[in-house]
Amino acid sequence: MVVMTLLFTLGTRDSEFEFGEKVGIIEINGIIADSKNVLDHLKRFREDDAIKAIVIRINSPGGAVGPSQEIFREIKKTSSTKKVVASMGTIAASGGYYIAAGADGIVANPGTITGSIGVIMGFTNYEDLLQKIGLVPIVIKSGEYKDIGSPVRKMKPEEKKILQDFARKIHKQFIRDIVQGRKMDPEKVRSLADGRIFTGEESKELGLVDRIGNLEDAIEWAGRLGGIEGKISTVYAKEKKFSLLKYVTDSSTDTLLNHILDPFLSADYIYRPEKGH
């Protein structure tokens, strides 16, 4: 019985059970709201001697600033010991591109939506709605700007300037990391960092992407960079046990909807066409 089970397991040829050198694949899908799983996968693959290179498969319009920066940093750390190639799917914009910029190379489809190098901040103002239903908000604060971006009152000109300066600083961080990760001229990156989106083909011409190709092309490139000869086997980073409730609450649509309806101020590296980019 044990022998039969072993034969069946090997017969499935799941790359997890194949011996030899492999390329590890980490998928980043949807809104980037948390970095923990990706960081764990990167660390696991980095410490696994059988994994010779890593492909980051990105299908994301971006997301929160902090998680995007954390993943970028971990990719850079990983690339010092193992080659990392980013593979762009349908979209890898804003924070999705930020992450890709940390890799040793980037592969995009001709029609991939990418770029959108910029920062967006926003909140929903409920002042008029509250007045119509007769609710009067009361705010007690310890400093003049403690409730900056409040959804229950109009924003003052000086507050708008503070937030604009804040967004500009985060934007500079985005540009700085692209310059570092892509080894591009700072002036050229600044000229492209106005929030515009680009196709994969345009991005290659501009130097934001290295090659045009699909996921298999990225795997092939990563494997050769990692020194693998002959057939390249792959292993996907496995997610935790599937939970329907978690899927519903963590889905990209739900995350984006909550983000849009959230009355509190937010700053993101995200391509959000309904609010500009």
Image (cartoon, rainbow, N blue to C red):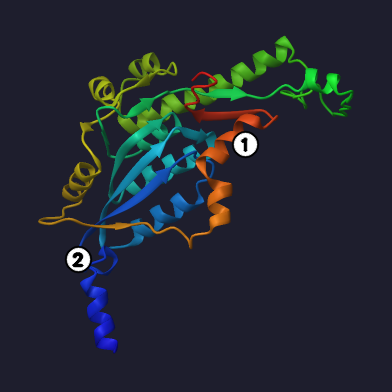
Q: Where in the figure is residue 265, as x and y percent of width and height?
A: 67, 28
Q: Nearer the viewer, residue 251 or 222?
A: 251
Q: Circle 1 — which element?
A: helix
Is 240 on the left-hand or right-hand side of 157? left
Q: Are marks 1 and 2 in contact (CB under 8 Å)?
A: no
Image quadrant containing the N terminus: bottom left
Question: In 3D space, how far apart are the residues under numbered discs 1 and 2 (Cα atoms)?
Answer: 44 Å
Identify the residue position indicated by label 1 in the image.
Answer: 258
Q: Where in the figure is residue 46, as x and y percent of width and height?
A: 34, 56
Residue type (three-letter) at the residue carrying disc 2: Gly
Identify the residue position indicated by label 2 in the image.
Answer: 20
| Eye-nearest disc, 1 or 2 | 1
Quadrant of the rendered structure where residue 275 is? top right
Q: Nearer the viewer, residue 128 or 81?
A: 128
Residue type (three-letter) at the residue carrying disc 1: Asn
Name the residue located 51 percent from the left edge and 35 percent from the top edge: 63
Between discs 1 and 2, the one toward the N terminus: 2
